Image (cartoon, coloured by chain):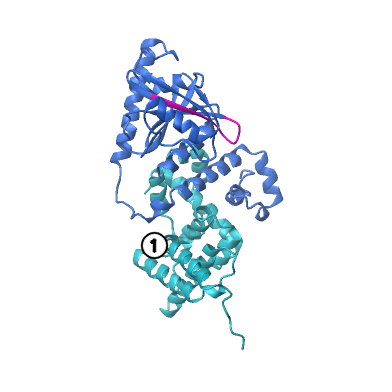
Chain colours: A blue, B cyan
Amino acid sequence: MSACATHREYLAAVADGETALVPRATLDHVKSCPDCTREIRAHQLLALKLRQSGDLLDEPAPQRRHSPLVWGRRRVIAAGVAAAILVGAAGFSWSVFSRPDPVLAAVNASSQPLQIESSDPSQVGQWCLSASGRTLPAIQLDGMQVVGARMDRIASTDIVTVVYVAPSGARVVVSWLEGQSPAGSGVEDRNISGHELLIVHSAVGTAVITGSSPDAMWQAAAAIESTAA
Amino acid sequence: MAIAVSERSPAEEGDLAAQIVNLRPRLLRFAWSLTRDREAAEDLAQETIARALAAQWRFQPGSNLKAWLFRILRNAQLNLARAAGTRPALVSIEELGGEPAGLHDDVNRVEARVIARADLRRIADVYRTLPPAFAGPLFLTAIEELSYAEAASILDIPVGTVMSRVYRARRLLIARLARGDS
């Protein structure tokens, strides 16, 4: 029986900040236990998503739903295959402006310098509107501080990139792809040459997320989904 | 004999009444988490609003209106069950018995990433499969963000039981998300 077993039942309470109900020994244990820390993080993320899904709880449970998500995932898988072919052919480079793949273009844009720096979401939103001629689905993301934005045009496709700082201090970059009408919702993670990125298909559009911290990237993905909901 | 007199102005009472009525969707969700029956949930929500409007003077200004209404709803459910000669089927022995083998392993394998990957509709669908004994505490604490103590008071169960059920509810949810159950 592992040392964690006696503490498991308290992990949700720790995740919820109900530490007054948790034995001292458990609090001491979780500080140094990666398994319990991981489970606490899972509880916190699940609680966040449950709150975000509140409105959906009113809808009757469907018998079976698959097509939007499956098609959304198929689209992503297809994009992944296309990206892999591109990567293989080009020997992979982050300078892929000559190639039309919007995901790779978004990744490339994420490492470029900002064209506007501002912590004011409305100012960044105005700039994005004037630069790209379209209103972004979401500028302000829950828990994220806006830093600035840039706009790139790749093969007649506008990619508007907004940079944030997460509460942890990690940098998160969200690139909105123009003309990527979402067929479903969900988040897919991809790894391109060791670089992790997330693709969020939401009701409001498709975004590519990169950043210095996977946790912060997932937090941004959840915030975009929340905006969509 | 003491007579309770409302200290609120008519305008304040009107505001409170409006707030009570506006909380109907949340009452409906809580009622559904307890009953798993749409019709019974609507009856309970309606009964709760009627009782709350009739007893507005009992509400302490500055306290949590939502928690007050949830407590009324839970009492209404118990009273209706008592009148019908039944007890709400809150929990079964199976539900409170041992957890499925390997559940902890599932949770560790799944980690936060799989939860984040699940879209909100999927999470809502899986939540709806939870037994009422688990769904009620989880609804109050995770979705309505009430404290464990408030949830215990509303459900009239010990706070330790709330803690245990919230934990088991979340682990069940995570395991079902990982396994693709619906």
Q: Is residue A208 visible?
A: no
Q: Say what amino acid the circle numbered 1 marks.
A: Arg
Residue at the image position 68 percent from the left and 54 percent from the top: A20
Q: Residues within 10 Å of mark 1 (few under 14, many from 20)?
A: some
Residue at the image position 43 percent from the left and 73 percent from the top: B50
- Point out the image quarter for the N terminus of chain A: top right
Q: Mark 1 — residue? A: B36
Q: Chain of mark 1?
A: B
Residue A96 screen position, x and y as percent: 40, 14
Q: Is residue A153 above or below residue A26?
A: above
Q: Viewer-proximal residue, A106 or A59?
A: A106
Q: Which residues are magenta?
A: A159-170
Q: Is residue B171 above or below residue A208?
A: below
Is residue A1 one of those drawn in magenta? no
Q: Viewer-proximal residue, A190 or A174?
A: A174
A18 on left or right of A55 = right
A63 on left or right of B33 = left
Residue B90 screen position, x and y as percent: 46, 65
